Image (spheres, rainbow, N blue to C red):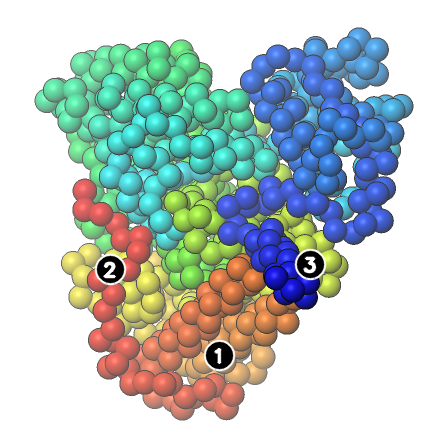
Amino acid sequence: MPKYLKWLFTFGVVLVLQSMAYATDGYKLWLDYKTISDSTLLKEYQSLVGSVQAYGNSETIEKANRELHEGLSGLLGMNAKKLKGTYSIVIGTYQTLPKDIASQFSNGLENINEEGYVIKSLGNHIVITAKTDIGVLYGAFNFLKRLQTQRSIENLNITDSPKIDIRILNHWDNLDRSVERGYAGFSLWNWHQLPDYKDPRYEDYARANASIGINGTVLTNVNSNALVLTPQYLEKVKALADIFRPYGLKVYLTARFSAPMEIGGLQTADPLDANVKTWWKNKVEEIYTYIPDFGGFLVKANSEGQPGPQNYGRNHVDGANMMAEALAPFNGVVMWRAFVYSEHDATDRAKQAYNEFVPHDGQFKDNVIIQVKNGPIDFQPREPFHPMFGAMPNTNLMIEFQITQEYMGGATHLVYQPKLFEEVFEADTYQKGKGSTVAKVIDGSLHNKKITGVAGVSNIGTDRNWTGHHFLQANWYGFGRLAWDPYLNSEDIAKEWTRMTFSNKAKFVDKVADMMITSREAVVNYMTPLGLHHIMATGHHYGPGPWVGNLSRPEWNPVYYHKADSKGIGFDRTPSGSNATAQYAPEVAAMFNNLTSCPEKDLLWFHHVQWSYKLKNGHSLWNGMALKYQEGVNQVAQMQTTWNQLENDVDAQRFNEVKMMLNIQYKEAKWWKDACLLYFQQFSKMELPKGVEAPAHTLEYYQNLQFPYAPGIRPQW
């Protein structure tokens, strides 16, 4: 072969290998320890970082040691065992560190809790220590994050602890591996092959959660199946718990309230029945023989057809406390969901959870925590905060967010949800006067709660990149960060994730973070602007369906929520309507009740407003609403433009996959705009204002669209 052909062949092979090396499928998430590309910074880090010295012989310390070796080897481009920089990395608990190093922490780490950590520069050491092994692991991840995000590692003095006790993912995964409201493939848990075949992905899952401080996982759907509590499945659960344990990840299960009848042979599940109490006590004891650190139960009861204590004339206190008694000897907890509404109750659906739970404030046992959705309806693109957060000072409350995007386009729409989480945490309940934010309720600081918690409905599946859309990894990541500290800034988190996942180039980071922050408001604008809510299509909730009004239960119909008529649109929740505002503190209620003081982002949530009503920008309600829909479409178009400008800064695989997803989102944003405005125009009888693009099809066209196989549909129970 001629020399020039050999050269071309070799050059071609090198290009292919380089392409393979830089392309990524997203599997490694934010833990892709690529070698630092800035040669000057790389040399600086190499000169500073020395060997890793681990003290302690637990599995968790071994995981921390392995993580540091893997991370340093990747980031610094050389085997971590050969690093000879100025600072050796020393890890271990205060109790296991060498005495000369431990003596430098004379206060005994009194400023951190059991999961907290300290990272401190001491002479020629960087010490990562904690009270517990899991704290050391969290500290190791934090140190690696500093390198990933190219921050200084000199003169370190970092002290950090989680502000919330239970930081948990709720998997709505079924035993057949389908995932209710799942948009990223099947369930991770291969129940058929467990316990003998342990997919390596299980450990990767636990590791990713530990890296962001998530310490619990509910393996099964809240619409639960009692079979998971049988020995056949407990053996499988044990296999997962054993893998997760070194990463500080506790396993929880959903408990079907009727399990004593379905798998126990009893004739009743009455929580006050002695035989039922004994059955649950024995079942809990059995679970702990398999899983000694079992976290407890998550329960959905008397909601959407699920059995519960009300089947027997009892209340939520009776049901939750009965289970709590069984779990108490093992320090287990009951997370009892407050998502309840009944077809037999004609009350505004937004009021029903408050009505059922608030009268029982102070009656739940200390190991019960009531799990409350962030808003009073159901994970909408925007809702006001749930009034229960300002009304139960004597009850443990945890907040439930939906990371998976049931009402936000599934996994095809880029929606950065930490912006939503932050908005809710910052909301002021006025429970103890101004400054009584939801964050203070949830972290327990407002009322010194016994247990605190944050739950997120998982968006994880078997798709190679875990979440279906590369950018939706940021919602998993951001949830973990805000569960650890609900006072963090969502924009800072977006930049942090972007640096760890894509690039540290400042312009790239700023542009991507701006796009992410904008994305949440964009989806509100093109789906449910100005306080509209729950106008999605039936069942799968994919796409618009404001015209739906033929379902058997009123509160399942979008027309129930928007109440559009010839006069105007919106749900009157003031004293002249359902009076749902009375469930808030007087200061909050007064703000929402007044048409002029009600934030316009919540306007149609609380008021039925005339089409001609003048908004603060001078537009009529109709024109303003139409322009908001158009603004949402325009924002997605700008996201497309921004992303296309970044092609040279992203590997080809992820660039093209995100580009295709943004194309889908733009197409569907226009679909939302066109369908909703055509439908509501029937009532307003007004022309579209200047600046709003004419719909591409007729209203009849949109109403006739059918999606029988849309992903994430709820199975029949």
- The percent position of residue 252, horizontal first and vertical second, equals 39, 27
* Residue 270 in which image quadrant: top left
Label 2 sits on residue: 709
The number of numbered badges drawn on the structure is: 3
Mark 2 element type: loop
Residue drawn at x 18%, y 61% as measured from the top left: 551
Residue drawn at x 30%, y 21% as measured from the top left: 234
- The percent position of residue 557, horizontal first and vertical second, equals 25, 62
Label 3 sits on residue: 509
Label 3, residues with CA under 10 Å away: few <14, some 14-19, many ≥20: some
Disc on res. 59: none
Considering the image in quadrants, where does the N terminus appear? bottom right
Residue 7, above or below 637: above
Label 1, residues with CA under 10 Å away: few <14, some 14-19, many ≥20: many
Camera-nearest label, 3 or 1: 3
Disc 3 residue type (three-letter): Val
Q: Earlier in the sequence, mark 1 or mark 2?
A: 1
Q: Earlier in the sequence, mark 3 or mark 2?
A: 3
